[in-house]
Amino acid sequence: MKDVIDLHTHTIASGHAYSTMNEMIHAAVDKGLEILGITEHAPALEESCRENYFVNLKILPRQRNGITVLYGAELNILDRDGHIDLPDTLLEKMDIVIASIHGFCYPHNTDIVYNTDAYLNVMQKHRINLIGHPDDYPVDYKAIVECAKVCGTLLELNCTSLNPVHYRFQNAEKNNRIMLEYCSEMEVPIVISSDAHVDLAVADHGKGIALLEEIGFPEHLIANANPEILKNYLNYYKN
């Protein structure tokens, strides 16, 4: 499978990553990517970027070293009502907006209804391009995939979650299999992301690709192999 996209990566600006922006871009070029997303953590995570960091993304060139570099945020979903940690007026100006649940700033909740509502409300209330790693907390995946289809939101197969050293690994493979089954059934596209926090991990999609091949997931629904899909989802192409 052709794999030319990595939309979800972090630099030292996020506070707990280890490579600079230039190092991440050079890694993307070396690995043959066409599109790289640099999506720093939003303010609710300690030591991450303040609001003004995202305001100033407008100064950065989108074409670097022969590839397209998109800039945005990985927002924190804060509660059942879908509250997030940056204003909607700012989200509209970003190339890419990811929304994710992180336990550091989300009530640890084993309630399927609460967690499902959190995802549904964030997609319905805000301009979200991509749901990041929806593979940790118990949720109703049928409802989430249906909502993503209606709202025009991509769903992510996060390869960091599939790494045995990561805290999400315990639930990730099982939950991703359920989500992917519904995506295949409802014709909802997905994107494979590295969630890289170091340049060596950019485009490290092997575990995700292996899972998709094992279950026979339709290639026409994988944005990494079909970049034209992104034109229907990312702010960069809509603004």
Image (spheres, helix red, strand yellow):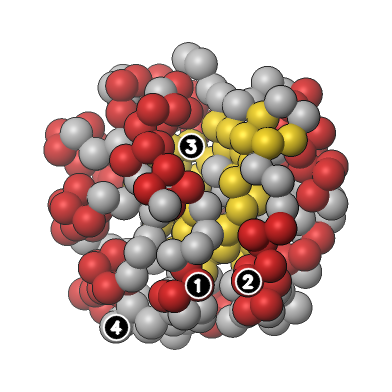
- Is residue 195 in sight in this rendering? no
Which of disc 3 and disc 4 is earlier in sequence?
A: 4
As helix, strand or loop, the secondary structure at mark 3 comes to: strand
How packed mark 4 is, by other alpha carbons closer than 10 Å (few <14, some 14-19, many 20 or more), is some
> What number is the disc on residue 55?
2
The answer to whether marks 1 and 2 mark residues whose Cβ atoms lie closer than 8 Å is yes
As helix, strand or loop, the secondary structure at mark 1 comes to: helix
Image position of 222 with respect to 89: above or below: above
Label 1, on which residue?
90
How packed mark 2 is, by other alpha carbons closer than 10 Å (few <14, some 14-19, many 20 or more), is some
Which of disc 1 and disc 3 is earlier in sequence?
A: 1
Front: mark 3 or 1: 1
Image position of 189 with respect to 20: above or below: above
Report which quarter residue 233 is drawn in: top left
- Is residue 1 in sight in this rendering? yes
How packed mark 3 is, by other alpha carbons closer than 10 Å (few <14, some 14-19, many 20 or more), is many
What amino acid is at disc 4? Asp
Viewer-side residue, 111 vs 74: 74
Going by the image, does 226 lie left or right of 12? left
What amino acid is at disc 2? Val
Mark pair 3, 1: CA separation: 26 Å
Going by the image, does 21 lie left or right of 169? right
Label 4, on which residue?
81
